[in-house]
Image: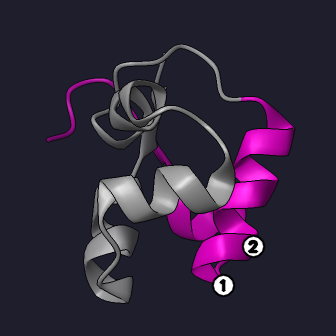
Amino acid sequence: MGKIILRLDRVMLERKISLNQLAEQVGITQANLSKIKNNKVNAVRFSTLAAICKTLSCQPGDILGYEEDGEP
């Protein structure tokens, strides 16, 4: 069984936005955003994902990915 991975760090780098800036604009704590950014969460609320996408002008597919087990 595969897993969902988060690529928020890549999108943030492309958009040149800091963790602090994004957290403030999205309305979540820096600690929670850091967990999302570093793939340390089991779930992300759709409302949070929508706010991140709105702020970064991206689609959920830009942030979310799928990997089969065993892939790097």
> Secondary structure under badge 1?
loop
Q: Could you say where residue 15 lies in the image, as x and y percent from the top left?
A: 38, 86
Q: Amino acid at mark 2?
A: Lys
- What is the quadrant of residue 45 in the picture? top right
- The residue sitting at 36% across, 54% down in the picture is 20
Q: Residue 25: horizontal and vertical position, in percent?
A: 62, 62
Q: Assess disc 2: are there few (<14), some (14-19) or many (≥20) residues with their C-alpha within 10 Å of its C-alpha.
A: some
Q: Badges 1 and 2: C-beta atoms under 8 Å apart?
A: yes
Q: Where does label 2 land, which residue? A: 54
Q: CA distance from mark 1 to mark 2?
A: 5 Å
**Residue 14: quarter of image:** bottom left
Total labels drawn? 2
In the displayed structure image, the side of residue 65 where residue 7 appears, left or right: left
53 up-or-down from 13: above or below: above
71 or 5: nearer the viewer = 5
Q: Tell me which segment is drawn in magenta.
A: 45-72
* Residue nearest the observer in this picture, 45 or 55: 55
Q: How is the image coloured?
A: one colour
Q: Quadrant of the C terminus?
A: top left
Assign a secondary structure to mark 2: helix
The numbered disc on residue 57 is 1
